[in-house]
Amino acid sequence: MTRWYLWGACWLVTCHYGRMSSVFLSGDADADALLADDPFALLMGMLLDQQVPMEVAFAGPAKLAERLGKLDVVEIAEMNPDEFLEKFSIKPAVHRFPKSMATRVQKLAAEIVDEYDADTAAIWTSGDPTGPEVLKRLKKLPGFGEQKAKIFLALLGKQFDFNADGWREAAGDYGTADSRRSIADVIDEDTLLEVRAFKKQQKAAAKAAKK
């Protein structure tokens, strides 16, 4: 059984033997370890999952952490925007659109500092919220629309033992067990390819519908 332990503004995901649980979101062991350890890194990866491959988006937090020395939500929120953009843009850039996404990351950090006392995990833990309530909180975050919020909720439920009432229903199709729709369903190389194939099919169908 996997358990969460909150420690200040950080979380730990541990198993019976005290070892960190693993994820396969970026395909890089160090980047994935950060995503498993740090809720802000995980949320930031979801924010970056736009107009770049999924694994590239979720590798972004580790790149930024290396350049800043650590991934501190307060430091990021208060950092000079030009200096932050400079770190964000070092090649390989954290995102293909560094200026707009650096701004979004800082806005996200500021929201977490202001609304959740710099504790990212409080978004889905504070007050023992239901799935629909967490979805509502996620949708209020800068850069999180309906779809992104549902995918992140599904990611919490499927890979981080988030078991609040109604989370699957709130996540919609992304909450369906054994689906291959989003990053929430990526647990290894095979599932990554399956999700990528599904996304490709969806794009092709949408393009055909416009003709």
Image: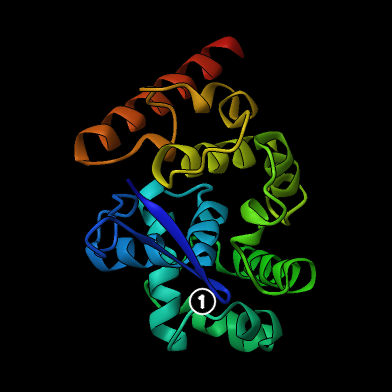
Image position, residue 57 (x, y; %): 44, 55
- 1 left or right of 165 in image: left
- 210 left or right of 174 in image: right
47 to 29, vertically: above or below: above
Towards the viewer: 113 or 69: 113
Amino acid carrying mark 1 in the image: Phe
Q: Is residue 146 visible?
A: yes
Towards the viewer: 118 or 75: 118
Q: In which quadrant will I find the C terminus?
A: top right
Q: Is residue 211 visible?
A: no
- 119 left or right of 61 in image: right
Q: Residue at 70%, 67% (x, y): give it.
A: 112
Specify the quadrant of the image occupied by residue 181.
top left
Towards the viewer: 169 or 71: 169
Image position, residue 185 (x, y; %): 37, 34
Q: Rate crowding at label 1 as few (under 14), some (14 to 19) or many (20 or more) other CA atoms within 10 Å.
A: many
Q: Secondary structure at mark 1?
A: helix
Residue linked to disc 1: 88
186 to 103, vertically: above or below: above
How many tags in the picture?
1
